[in-house]
Image: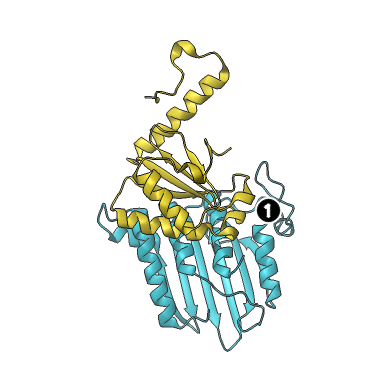
Amino acid sequence: MRDLSLHLLDLIENSTRAGASVVAISIAQERARDLMTLSIEDDGPGLSAPPEKATDPFYTTKPNKRVGLGLSLFAATAERAGGRMEVGTSPLGGLAVRATMQLGHIDRAPLGDIASTLATAICSNPGVDFRVSISVDGKSFDVSSAATAARRIPPDDAAFLVARQVATEIRNAMAALKLIE
Amino acid sequence: MASSETPKAGKISSLKDLQAIKERVLTDTALRADGYKVCITVHMGTCGIAAGAREIMNTLMDELAASGRRDIRITTSGCIGVCVHEPVMTVERLNSEPVIYAKLDANKARLIFREDALGGKTVSQLALGVGKES
């Protein structure tokens, strides 16, 4: 994966395929602590294997597959930047994946196009509420795809239009918060 | 109603024929029930994402917005086992066989959207095959 936004897309796809109806994504940067935290949580069925098994690249729950690379690649990306990835249970009831890394680490992957990742997820999953939280040194921005869709009047509530609006809001928020790429 | 390619009742000779009818009816009904005439599925397994599937989605969303159409659905699904051909997408028009397109980039996705999804013509030179993902 070239950047962190592609890892997030991969994990979001896991959540939606597992049947989640709410997916919460959080991106937080704390400059004073040289810390970046990414998390994704959902209300899906959660993990059916022990956490250490989930990060084994040769373990997958999908039939007819031999490898499950998503979580193991994300863990490797976090560790390469002086951090780690943890898998657990979310207060939403499903899976929680949380990765920390040193914000200024020379090997930290760039954040990438978070807005496009969310646009892709929203466009293809109109029934799922994607809740995004971005914070930089305590200042934060929050958006929900379900709330955005509810504000639009049919037929302008089509999934791809909601996706594009949320993506624009995320791009604007990232610029306003001066998120470090 | 099934399409003209579906075996007629008198010509059903195997379980495979029945399965084909079932799949076709399910597909047609699913597309029609939602009011969509075309469904484009971008395959978003880890392999597809790493190969550039998100850029294909971005292109398709831009094209859909520019077209003004509201009866085309763009969605995603997982890996279909042809990782070496990623990025891959399937275009499914009502009452037509789904067509799988492979080794895509933004320009190819744009061409396929205009020719196939909007124009109703398969772009043969970019097609990997015909049929549903397994």
In the image, which lettered chain appears cyan? Answer: A
For the point 51% across and 66% down, the residue is A25
Above or below: residue A14 compared with residue B32: below
Q: Which of the image's four quarters has the C terminus of chain B?
A: top right
- In the image, residue A90 lies at what x, y percent? 57, 61
For the point 69% across and 61% down, the residue is A72
For the point 35% across and 59% down, the residue is A162
- In the image, residue B40 lies at what x, y percent? 44, 46
The secondary element bearing badge 1 is classed as loop
- Specify the quadrant of the image occupied by residue A75: bottom right
Total residue callouts: 1
Query: Is residue B19 left or right of A156 when viewed as pictured?
Result: right
Seen from the viewer's position, the closer of residues A102 and B9 is: B9
| Subunit of label 1 | A
For the point 64% across and 62% down, the residue is A88
Query: Is residue B74 left or right of A86 when viewed as pictured?
Result: left
Seen from the viewer's position, the closer of residues A20 and B91 is: B91
In the image, which lettered chain appears yellow? Answer: B
- In the image, residue A79 lies at what x, y percent? 70, 73
> Residue tagged by mark 1?
A68
- Specify the quadrant of the image occupied by residue A62: top right
Under mark 1, the amino acid is: Gly
Residue at the extreme bottom: A32
Q: Which of the image's four quarters has the N terminus of chain B?
A: top left
- In the image, residue A94 lies at what x, y percent? 57, 56
Seen from the viewer's position, the closer of residues A58 and A146 is: A58
